Image (cartoon, rainbow, N blue to C red):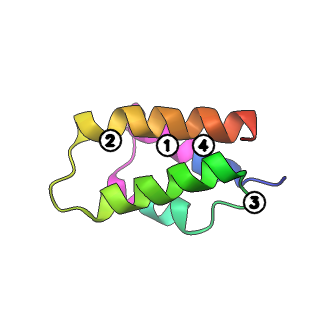
Amino acid sequence: MSTSPDVVQTLAHWLAGHVGLGDVQRALDEPGDLGPESAALVAELREELDNPHCSRPKLQPLVRETIEAIALGE
């Protein structure tokens, strides 16, 4: 399974406040090969990012869960 390291790095940098949501959206455009759980979380994250009412507090747990799933290869 080959995952773009940019996805995990970008998500981690967003959590730390170093990049914006635009960077996250670009990283999610080409996440590489993902396991089923990771792919579902990426899809959910994309959906949330498309929501004009998404907020950082709501996104943070989803971003953390996505990083963990990708790192574990799920």
Q: What is the three-letter code of the residue carrying label 3?
A: Asp
Residue 24 seen: no
Most prominent secondary structure in the magenta stretch? Answer: helix
Residue 15 seen: yes
Q: Quadrant of residue 56?
A: top left
The earlier-in-sequence mark between 2 and 4 is 4
Q: What is the three-letter code of the residue carrying label 2?
A: Leu
Query: Mark 1 = which residue?
Result: 11
Query: Mark 4 = which residue?
Result: 8
SS class, disc 4: helix
Per the model, the C-alpha gap separating discs 2 and 1 is 11 Å
Mark 3 Cα within 10 Å, few/some/many (few <14, many 20+)? some
Query: Mark 3 = which residue?
Result: 33
Mark 4 Cα within 10 Å, few/some/many (few <14, many 20+)? many
Image x and y of residue 40, in percent: 55, 54
Outermost residue toward the bottom in this view: 29
Mark 2 Cα within 10 Å, few/some/many (few <14, many 20+)? some
| Front: mark 2 or 4 | 2
Q: The magenta stretch spans which residues? A: 9-23
Query: Mark 2 = which residue?
Result: 59
